[in-house]
Every structure is written in structure tokens, then in C-alpha cells.
Amino acid sequence: MDYRDICMKVCDIAREAGEFIARERKTFSFSKVEFKGTQNMVSYVDKQSEKMIVEKLRLLTPEAGFITEEGTASGGGEALSWIIDPLDGTTNFIHALPPYCVSIGLMENGEMVIGVVYEVTHKEMFYTWKGAKAYLNGEEIHVSSTDNLENALIAVGFSYATITTTENYLDSIIYFQKNTNGIRRIGSATADLVYVACGRFDAFNQVKLSSWDVAAGACIAKAAGAVVCDYKGGNDYIFGQEIIASNPHIFEEFKKHIK
């Protein structure tokens, strides 16, 4: 398989979906929003974007299966599975706030081999493929060189479910707010991960995530030099609903304070 060639074609697919999302944002209204649950919104834009992506990926890799947020296609392939979030950061999109992203990852035999993330509002294309570095709009990117937690800018993510069901999670947030350069919650786990990859954030953690929230972004972050793991330090972060991503210099100290 020519991972680079497929990755470049997926970048084109992600960009086309992002351009559709940007056009629809110009006339979008809250009346078009549907609620899947508390603080869990979706729109026709998410669904149509996903259909567009799936249709083109089927032509690119007919043998691959799909894991998608909106359920327009389902079922993993025997060896290959596309993991897709057509619009990560839907709440931001609805309120016309950046960032929001198209996220497309390819898993081969349990390993992420392609990651593509297109941040729509700034037209930023993040991508990597198996054996490659990580890139942003054609330029190689790396994690930050921050070497102590005190100077780190930390990204956190949490949902209604996290706050009501996860004991002590807020304790970690309070600790990082008091003992780092600051924390940010930007509303898109995909963006959090690629921002770690390019050094805008030094570290990120979140629980209650789905595979489509993290697959492509984690692939890119690892290629850029990040340490990516679950809360136990293992590799169950794609389907395990919890993730840590950090530059290697502060990883151990960062992980120690996550509850």
C-alpha cells in the first residue's frame, strides 16, 4: 500500500468536506440543530459531510470498512477501517466559533497508518502516514520543547458526562490551572491533539471520548514526537475513551497529576 499517495488523496477529500462546511456556516441557523443527548448536538452539515467523505473513501479503498460518528457507514473491514469524524467541534460550528475540524484516520490491522485533520476556520491541513513525519500545510511540525510543567500550556476537554461521573477530574484541572502557564478548553479533541503536534499546546488529556474524536489526531501527534497513551500509560486510547498526549519532556510529571 502506498500510504503517502492515499494520504494526499485523503487530504483532498478532507479539504473538500471542509469547504462544504465553511459554505454552510454562512447561512446556518440554530433552528437546524438536532440534539442526540445533553450537550450533544448534530446538524445536517455533520451528516452530509460524512456522506461525502464516505462516498469518496469507498472509491479510494473499496476493501475498507468504516467507523463513523454519524452512522452513515458502519462495520470495520477485515484489515482496513476508516475512522471518521466529519465535524469535530460541532458546538463551536453551531456558534460560529473556531476551531472545528474534519478528522479522517485509517487503521490497518489495529495500527493507525494515516491521519488527516483539516481545521476549517484557518484552512490548516495536518497530516501524516506510516513511516512519515507530521506536516501542517506542507511544513514539518514537531511538539514543543517546553521542559517543565510550570511553563506548559495545557489543553483539557470535558463534557457533562465527565463532570457528573468522573470523581476528582476537576481536581486535576484545578491543579493545572494553579501550577502551569494555564489551561484551555477549545471544544475539539481533534484540534487539541494536532495543536500538541505543532507545539501550540504542550499537553492534553480527556476522558469519555470516542475513536473518531482521537484516531487521526493521535496519529499525527505521535508522528510529531508526542507521547500518546491511555491513563494507565498503555495503548488503549483509540477505543478506551481516555487519552493523554504530551511532549516527552513533561509527560511523566503531567501524567502524575491526572486523576
Image (spheres, rainbow, N blue to C red):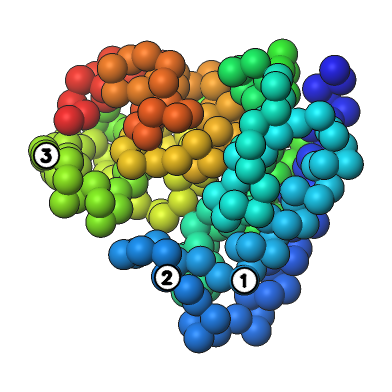
Q: Which residue is mark 1?
A: 44
Residue 56: x and y in percent read: 83, 48
Quadrant in which the C terminus appears: top left
Q: Tell me which amino acid carries mark 3.
A: Glu
Residue 185: x and y in percent read: 34, 52
Question: Badges 1 and 2: C-beta atoms under 8 Å apart?
Answer: no
User: Which numbered disc covers residue 27?
Assistant: none
- Say left or right for 255 vs 58: left
User: Which numbered disc covers residue 35?
Assistant: 2
Q: Is residue 54 above or below residue 90?
A: above
Q: Tell me which amino acid carries mark 1.
A: Tyr
First in sequence: mark 3 or mark 2? 2
User: Quick check: can you spot residue 115?
Assistant: no
Q: Is residue 250 above or below residue 137?
A: above
Q: Nearer the viewer, residue 246 or 103?
A: 103
- How many marks on residues? 3
Q: Which residue is mark 3?
A: 167
* Local SS, label 3: loop
Discs 3/2, front: 2
- Say left or right for 7 vs 47: right
Quadrant in which the N terminus appears: top right
Disc 3 crowd, CA 10 A, few/some/many (<14, 14-19, 20+)? few
